[in-house]
Amino acid sequence: MKRTAALGALVLALALATAPAFAAPTVSEKQDVAIFALGYYGWAIPYETLGNIDLEIQKVFVDLGRFNIIGVTQRLSSGGLEQFIATLRKAKEANFVMPEKYQFGEAILTEAEFNKLVGAFIVAAPVVTNFNSYYDQKRVEWVTEIKTNVTFIDVAGGGKVLAISEVQTSGSNKQNQNASIQNAIDAIPMQLQYEIRKIPAFQINTRVLAVSGNEIKMQLGQNMGIKKGDEYSVIVGGIVEGFKDEREAGLVVIKDVGAEVSTAAVVYSSAKLTKDVQLREIPRMGIDLEPYIHLVGGEAKAFLPGFRAVVSRGFYGFRPYVGLQVPLGQMWSFFGLATFIPVSAVFGGEYNLSLGRLSLTPYGGVGASYVYYMDASGTSTETNYFPHIGGQAYLRASYLLTRDMKVFAEVGADYWIAISSFFENYGGLGFGAGIAFKL
């Protein structure tokens, strides 16, 4: 009996030693953030442009849903930002004398305004570090480039810089400079959201509430800005001798979002999912980029390299996509002086049927092609010439190799009708393969 009991104790000890360790879960709460107006000193930026960038930056923090926002009308230059951080650090000193007004570069804060900022957990200070809007003779269009740095300062930590998020966007328009500027501004929100969600201090931590088959209920929902298509890692481990010993053991995808509770589908997990298992947000841009190659039969066989960009954040089952593909056999050259390359643009949707790491995805779309023109000097541009209209329908089978990449094969059909005598119809049954990157 004693030997049996000892053997049982040994087996139990080994089982506990080899089982995944779960630390006590942490659940994120909203954080107070004070946001300065956009600093731009040294750059000739139209006032309307400045206001539009301000609105987009404020909107990003609102849409993220994980912050209580305090707005600040003052603008900081790069030098003023350095002075502000230095003053925050001095404010923690016992012999610090509170002035009636603070001046940081050209920005002036009253004592009350400064105290309001000190009361916030984090201060965000966006500053334009590059603004360039010009007419590109080679591309024959207006081009605008904007680079903005957002510095996040931990006030409670004595002015420690948490992170500096760099956002570079560009826009173009063939007729209008203001339209190119607006296109560059419109590109800011998606990139800035991603940059903010990448910062560890802002990533959402939550926990499993309940498990039912291949689905889980997890704490937090619309109250923290969680969206369909968001992904969370299953975290195992904890603290060993004062050191963090955590690792990812699984992946879940949000399929439905409630006010305070979300439902997620389990893609895979090497650890048993139970109540209070730790989950952590995986920050993504929200786009799956899928380069592929199609071989299409029919009267005019076609070799079609291309790529799809599928919108994943905000969607779960049905997801929209846009694709570009080049029918290589339709390219032609005019005595070596110019080359005309048709590019087919496709707009459509897919329905993702998830079976864990394996997915089956029927998809289809319609579109038209335009001609990309290149002369002997290397100057190239898009034209307003449309040689084809057509569409595609396929069934894709994909397998998730890692949490960030999957491979796929697909079978279906492409068919494109020539509406120009310089080109011909092509299409028929096709098959292809590719790799998908989850960005």
Image (tube, helix red, strand yellow):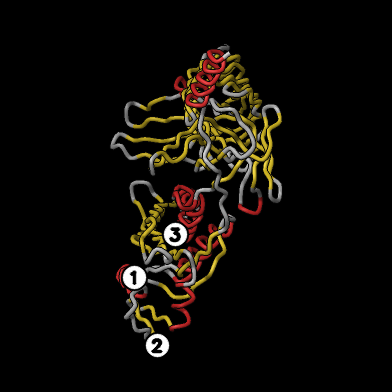
- Which one is in front, 29 or 286? 29
Amino acid carrying label 2: it is Glu
Measure the C-alpha gap from mark 1 to mark 3. 43 Å
* Mark 2: secondary structure: loop
Residue at the spot of label 2: 100
Q: Nearer the viewer, mark 1 or mark 2?
A: 1
Is residue 427 visible in this depiction of the protein? yes
Number of residues whose C-alpha sits closer than 10 Å to that of mark 2, classed few (under 14), some (14–19) or many (20 or more): few
Quadrant of the rendering where the N terminus is positioned: top right
Q: Residue at x 55, y 27 (%)?
A: 271
x and y, in percent, of residue 257 in the image: 68, 44
Q: Is residue 310 above or below residue 38?
A: above
Amino acid carrying label 3: it is Gln
- Which one is in front, 128 or 381? 128
Number of residues whose C-alpha sits closer than 10 Å to that of mark 3, classed few (under 14), some (14–19) or many (20 or more): some
Name the disc covering residue 177, or none: 3
- Which one is in front, 67 or 342? 67
Q: Nearer the viewer, mark 1 or mark 3?
A: 1
Q: Residue at x 32, y 80 (%)?
A: 95
- Among numbered discs 2 and 3, the one appearing first in the sequence: 2
Residue at the spot of label 1: 89
Measure the C-alpha gap from mark 2 to mark 3. 44 Å
State yes or no: discs 1 and 2 in contact (Cβ < 8 Å).
no
Tell me which corner region of the image, top left, top right, bottom left or bottom right, holds residue 214: top right
Amino acid carrying label 1: it is Arg
* Mark 1: secondary structure: helix
Measure the C-alpha gap from mark 1 to mark 2. 18 Å
